[in-house]
Structures are given as structure tokens and as C-alpha cells.
């Protein structure tokens, strides 16, 4: 069975005053059905750009998609007309959980109004007819209203919001940070998506709340067989949630492995140094020498080679091909580290 | 490093913010700090951990005099800082410095790095000559591992990590004794975080600094700090040596906090994490122990009687009635 989502050779540039920044440099990514994939990398590595490309919300210009494909169930999303993307894909088959739920809830409308507005357009039973009036003034399709409301209450119960009926009458500021994150998770589940893109959904939360939300999210998507692309720079939360991890560095994917193998046998020099830079209980911490390169004139070949202790001359000339040291473990490196557990 | 004498002694420090209703009438108060006491010893790193709203940032700002304290006392260099006049506080601040979350953000975008680094000296050390100032600035930038050539650059020409280094250098020019670091690594990538942590370790050794390290990241605190104080809703619930607290926490809140740290490659918290609910509203606290509404060990005594910090095993204090018997219940 083909994967649910497959991104192949995606190149995205951003036009800046200094020239074109090559933010994604031929990225490949596959997400299986019901699989939770963690996309891990540091700020500026292109994980948000990749997520936005899949959702079709890249700001163009300045962004330019130069080449590549994004296939969802056999449909190339990059060639799909904007209208079809909006009606059939975004918010229906692919939904989004933002980093900061407060920013995606309107402070002046009740939560119920906002969730029902989502259902008006994106309910699995159909959508409101696009009328002469914008958004909020379009009447709700009468026939589905009751069923949709039941669905909303059901979703709020699923994310363990106490007293869902009362919650719908409240405003966003009346909820705590953890509850707001539960609300946007409920909204992402409502339209019965195949894929959820979660953009660091727990960075704004405290550790005890984060643990609750991660456990909840994992249980909900596994029950429903939904695939998740989870972008994060925190290896700890990725470990909690994901089945597989893909590491990106400066616009290139460098290593992809099932979760347990990833932490037990990391092979790419960047992955290993990333794991080593986590603080250890014994008071030691190791830095990665050098800094992340600029993307307007990036290093050729493997973009990690100027910082890499193993680099040879070929690393700067050609990007290493995909190597499969073991089933499911893909690696792009000419000189991988020995696959021993990190220290 | 062995801990020396007490440099900062905090006793029953309180900070209450008044709450007003829609008509501006006083309707109560929010006890952001409610009787906090601890000592900071010379040369140590004391971590202050807790979730948002527990009062850890208020603690840092109250110590600095940015919020006037409601009560209590803070002894530093032989004087009580609470109730000090603004001018007297300003003189203290060259010795007791506050490092914001992103020290790079305190750089003026239109000033060269050299001017930004010299500014604290102009304010606090008017006795220094221009040449002495320039020498101090060069020493400061070297100590944070940046080349002297960077002195002629503007902040936007540096990366985020370098800006943070300059921000730290700016604080070091005055040779402070105690630094209050407020979430210095939050929001950083792990590799940049690693460089900042290394730098903080190195600077402490080089300048003989004492840190009060406020953070919500327990992995970082465990790595860096000698002692840890755990705060919950304006009170310290447990304080003691880092290794003892992490190996054998003696307060139920510390236990759940530690259970929530993800350990890449180890045990998964999502499989066994049990802490229910969220912290109560700090403006209307439960009676007795403030943690009892979320605590598995809570008994009638917890609602009736507020537990006080008491010594459990010689140097580690816990504010739980059942601190010794947590494992048996």
C-alpha cells in the first residue's frame, strides 16, 4: 500500500533582498497510514516551510516552489487548483494544530461560535453554500446543524473538556493554556482528517500539562488511525509521541529511522551531535562546533559538511544518496558514524 | 564547587498584587509570593523551578526591586533590600544583576556592540577613564568567547546566539556577585542551548559568580544547578541538593514534575503519567496545602493545616505533612 503522504524532491526558495534563499533543498518525506512522524530540526531548518507547503499556505511570493511533488493518496497537491485545495484538502483531509492556540482563537467570539463556523464550511457531511455574504453572515445549513453540534460536543468530550455545553458558551480567555490546546486539538479532529500537521503543539505548555496533552493526542490519533506530522525541536516530546523521526538540517533531510532505532543507533554525524547536545544529569553538555549556515549561499553538497568531523572532499560536491543500513532506516551520509548507542 | 557563605538571604518574602473589579474597587489580592525563604551561598547555582504562574519570575523581579516587596526581608551585602530607596537600589544592582530571558534583546539596534558594552560602566563607574573602559569592554567580549572584531558590529550582524553572548558580556563588565537568570535557555535550539550552558559554567568559574537560575526546564536545572527550589503557587514546596531531589523527591508535586520530564531513549512519560488537572487560580487558593486538589496523597489534615517547610534529611526541606512516608501510602 502506498504511503498516505509522499513528498519527493521538494525544492522551495524564498526571494530576499540578498538573493534567493534555498530553504528546502530536495526534501523527501513519507508518512504511512496511521503513522506519527516527528520532523525534528533546529530553527531555520525548514520544518515549518515543509509543513506549510503540504498545507498549501506558503506565502507566494516571496516563496517559490521550484520542483518536486507532494502526493496525498495519489493526488499531487502542488498541481491542484487553489479552490479544490481549499474545499477538499485543507481543513478536511489535512488539518493543523498550531503552536499557540490563543493566536488561532478569536478573542471576541464565543468558542462555540468559532467551532460551529468551522463546521459550517468543513463538516464531513457537506459545506455551506458560498453565498453573497462573507463568512459569518452565510446562514448555517439547517439540516446538518443538530448533527454537527453533536459532533462538536463529542469532540470536546474526547479531548476531556469538562462540561462541553458550558465550554461552548465561553470565550477563549476563560480557558487555561492547556484547555485552549485541547480546544484546537478538538477542532483538528472534527473534520475527520487523514493527516494532522501539529506544529510544536506543546512548546507553550508546562511540563505536567505537556505530558497530559501528549498522552491525549497520541491516544486520539491511534484510536482513529490518523497520521500525524509533528514538527518540533524538542527530541524529548518527539520521543513521547512519534513512531518515526525524520531529522532535517538546513533544508535537507539527513536521517529517518523508527523511534527506538533512532535513539539507540543514530548514524548521521549531525543527529549524533544533536543528541549529545542534550543536557546530561552529570553536569556535562557538548556543543556542536560552528553555526547554522545562511541559506542564500549555502554550502554545496551535504550542508552539514563544514561542521562535520567526518567530512571528506566528496561531501562538499554532491549530496549523499539515500542509504538504507536497515529496513526503515534511511540515511544520507558518505561517512556515517559507527552505529553504536550515543554516550 | 563547595558552597561558601550565604550571600543572599531571603526571609518570608511576600509580593501580593491587588486585584480590582470592573469598577476599580479592590476585590482581593493575588499572592504571587507568599512567604518565601531561602539562602543563596557563595559560588553556588540555585535553581528555581516550577510551572508558569508559580511565582518564580516574580521572585527574581522582587529581589531586584523591580516590584516592591509586600513584606519580608532580603539580606545582601549587609543590608536589607526590602524598602530600599530607588537610588540605593541602583547602586546595589551593579552587584546583583538580572539577566532577562533574551539578553540580546537589550542591545540597542543602532549602537555598535562596543557602545552597548560600555554603557553600564558609564552609568555605574563614572570614575573610570575612557581607556580603562575600553579595556574592560575588550575583556568582557573575550570572556564570552567572541572575537574583539565584533565590537565594531551592530546587533543585527550577529546571530541570535552571539547576541545572547553579548548580552551576558554587558552584564559582566560590572563584575557582579550574584546573577539572577530568568529562563536563559527557553526557546533555544538544543545546540545553542548547549553553548549557552557551557558559557554559564565557564563564567561562573572565571568570575566566581553565584547564580539564581530560574527555569522550567528540569533537564537543564539538573545539569547545571547545585541546589534546587521547587515552587508551587507562590511557595517553595521543596528545596535541597539537586541530586537528592532528583533521586528521591519528598514532595508529591516534585514527584509529578519529575515524572513529566521526557527522557529521550528511556521511559515514556505518556505511558504512566498520572498528575490530574491544572493548577488552581492563584487568586482563590485552596485552604491548607495548595497542592492538595491535585495530590494523590491528600488527606483531611492537608485541608485543615498548611504544611510548613521542614528539614527532612539534613539540608533538604519539604513542605508536605507526609514527606517521610510518601512511599508507604
Image (tube, rainbow, N blue to C red):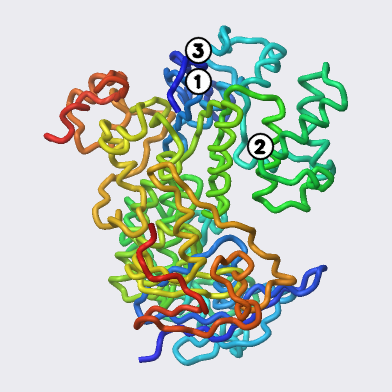
From the image, tell me which residue sits under label 3: B71
Secondary structure found at label 3: strand
Residue B20 in picture, x, y percent from top left: 54, 26
Which residue is at 45% across, 13% downward? B11
Foreground tag (1 vs 3): 1
Q: Is residue A158 visible?
A: yes
Q: Chain of mark 3?
A: B
Q: Which quadrant of the figure contains the C terminus of chain A?
A: bottom left
Q: Chain of mark 1?
A: B
Circles 1 and 3: CB atoms closer than 8 Å: no
Instruction: Respond whether the residues carrying marks 1 and 2 are from the same subunit.
Output: yes
Label 2, residues with CA under 10 Å away: few <14, some 14-19, many ≥20: many
Query: What residue does disc 2 label?
Result: B168
Query: Within 10 Å of the Cα at label 1, are there few (<14), some (14-19), or many (20+) other Cα atoms?
Result: many
Looking at the rendered structure, the number of numbered marks drawn on it comes to 3
- Tell me which numbered mark, 1 or 2, is placed earlier along the sequence: 1
How far apart marks 3 and 2 lie (CA) works out to 31 Å
Residue at 39% of width from left, 61% of height from top? A342
In the image, A184 versus B137, the foreground residue is B137
Nearest the camera: A226 or A303?
Answer: A303
Q: Position of residue B313 (x, y in %)?
A: 24, 22
Residue A326: % across, % down: 35, 81
Q: Secondary structure at mark 2?
A: helix
Q: Chain of mark 2?
A: B
Q: Nearer the viewer, residue A196 or A42?
A: A42
Q: Quadrant of the N terminus of chain A?
A: bottom left
Q: Quadrant of residue B25?
A: top right
The Cα atoms of the two marked residues, 1 and 2, are separated by: 20 Å
Disc on res. B216: none
Q: Is residue A159 above or below residue A19?
A: above
**Residue assigned mark 1:** B42
Amino acid at each position: 500500500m502506498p504511503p498516505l503522504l509522499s513528498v519527493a524532491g521538494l525544492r522551495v526558495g524564498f526571494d530576499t533582498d540578498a538573493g534567493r534563499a534555498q530553504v528546502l533543498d530536495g526534501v523527501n518525506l513519507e508518512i504511512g497510514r496511521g503513522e506519527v512522524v516527528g520532523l525534528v530540526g533546529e530553527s531555520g531548518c525548514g520544518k515549518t516551510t515543509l509543513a506549510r507547503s503540504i498545507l498549501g499556505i506558503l506565502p507566494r511570493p516571496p516563496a517559490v516552489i521550484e520542483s518536486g511533488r507532494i502526493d496525498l493518496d495519489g493526488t499531487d497537491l502542488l498541481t491542484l487548483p487553489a479552490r479544490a485545495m481549499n474545499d477538499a484538502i485543507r481543513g478536511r483531509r489535512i488539518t493543523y494544530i498550531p503552536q499557540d492556540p490563543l493566536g488561532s482563537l478569536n478573542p471576541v467570539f464565543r468558542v462555540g461560535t468559532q467551532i460551529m463556523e468551522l463546521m459550517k464550511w468543513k463538516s464531513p457531511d457537506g459545506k455551506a453554500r458560498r453565498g453573497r455574504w462573507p463568512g459569518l453572515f452565510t446562514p448555517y445549513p439547517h439540516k446538518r446543524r443538530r448533527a454537527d453540534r453533536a459532533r462538536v460536543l463529542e469532540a470536546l468530550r474526547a479531548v476531556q473538556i469538562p462540561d462541553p455545553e458550558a465550554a461552548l458558551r465561553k470565550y477563549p480567555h476563560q480557558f487555561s493554556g492547556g484547555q485552549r490546546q485541547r480546544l484546537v486539538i478538538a477542532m483538528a479532529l472534527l473534520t475527520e482528517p487523514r493527516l494532522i500537521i501539529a506544529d510544536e503543539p506543546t512548546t507553550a505548555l508546562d511540563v505536567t500539562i505537556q505530558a497530559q496533552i501528549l498522552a491525549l493526542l497520541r491516544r486520539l490519533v491511534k484510536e482513529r488511525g490518523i497520521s500525524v506530522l509533528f514538527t518540533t525541536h524538542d527530541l524529548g516530546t518527539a520521543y513521547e509521541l512519534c513512531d518515526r523521526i525524520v531529522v532535517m538540517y538546513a533544508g535537507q533531510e539527513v536521517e529517518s529511522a523508527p523511534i527506538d532505532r533512532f535513539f539507540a543507533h543514530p548514524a548521521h554525524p549531525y543527529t549524533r551531535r544533536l543528541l549529545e547536545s542534550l543536557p546530561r544529569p552529570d553536569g556535562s553538555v557538548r556543543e556542536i562546533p560552528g553555526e547554522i549556515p545562511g541559506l542564500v549561499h549555502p554550502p554545496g553538497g551535504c550542508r552539514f559538511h563544514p561542521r562535520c568531523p567526518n567530512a571528506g572532499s566528496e561531501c562538499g560536491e554532491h549530496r549523499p544518496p539515500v542509504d538504507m543500513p536497515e529496513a526503515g532506516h534511511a540515511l544520507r551520509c558518505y561517512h556515517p558514524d559507527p552505529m553504536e548507542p550515543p554516550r | 564547587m563547595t558552597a561558601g557563605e550565604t550571600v543572599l538571604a531571603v526571609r518570608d518574602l511576600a509580593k501580593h498584587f491587588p486585584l480590582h473589579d470592573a469598577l476599580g474597587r479592590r476585590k482581593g489580592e493575588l499572592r504571587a509570593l507568599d512567604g518565601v525563604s531561602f539562602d543563596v551561598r557563595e559560588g553556588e547555582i540555585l535553581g528555581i523551578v516550577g510551572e508558569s504562574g508559580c511565582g518564580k519570575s516574580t521572585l527574581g523581579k522582587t529581589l531586584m526591586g523591580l516590584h516592591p516587596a509586600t513584606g519580608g526581608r532580603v539580606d545582601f551585602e549587609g543590608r536589607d533590600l526590602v524598602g530600599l530607596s530607588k537610588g540605593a537600589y541602583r547602586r546595589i544592582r551593579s552587584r546583583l544583576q538580572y539577566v532577562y530571558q533574551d539578553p540580546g534583546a537589550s542591545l540597542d539596534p543602532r549602537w555598535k556592540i562596543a557602545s552597548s558594552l560600555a554603557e553600564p560602566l558609564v552609568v555605574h563607574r563614572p570614575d573610570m577613564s575612557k581607556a580603562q573602559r575600553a579595556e574592560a569592554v575588550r575583556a568582557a567580549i573575550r570572556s564570552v568567547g567572541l572575537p574583539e572584531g565584533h565590537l565594531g558590529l551592530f546587533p543585527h550582524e550577529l546571530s541570535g546566539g552571539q547576541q545572547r553572548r553579548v548580552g551576558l558580556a554587558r552584564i559582566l563588565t560590572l563584575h557582579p556577585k550574584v546573577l539572577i537568570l530568568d529562563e536563559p535557555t527557553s526557546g533555544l535550539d538544543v545546540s545553542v542551548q548547549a553553548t549557552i550552558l557551557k558559557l554559564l559554567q565557564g563564567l561562573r568559574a572565571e568570575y566566581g559568580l553565584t547564580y539564581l537560575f530560574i527555569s522550567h526546564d528540569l533537564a537543564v536545572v539538573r545539569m547545571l544547578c547545585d541546589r534546587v527550589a521547587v515552587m508551587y503557587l507562590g511557595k517553595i514546596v521543596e528545596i535541597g541538593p539537586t541530586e537528592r531531589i532528583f533521586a528521591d523527591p519528598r514532595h508529591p508535586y516534585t514527584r509529578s514534575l519529575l515524572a513529566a520530564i521526557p527522557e529521550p531513549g528511556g521511559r515514556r512519560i505518556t505511558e504512566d503519567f498520572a498528575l490530574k488537572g491544572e493548577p488552581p487560580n492563584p487568586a482563590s487558593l485552596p485552604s491548607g496545602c495548595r497542592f492538595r486538589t491535585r495530590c494523590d496523597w491528600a488527606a483531611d489534615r492537608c485541608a485543615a493545616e498548611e504544611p510548613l517547610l521542614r528539614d527532612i534529611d539534613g539540608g533538604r526541606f519539604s513542605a508536605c505533612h507526609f514527606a517521610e512516608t510518601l512511599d508507604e501510602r
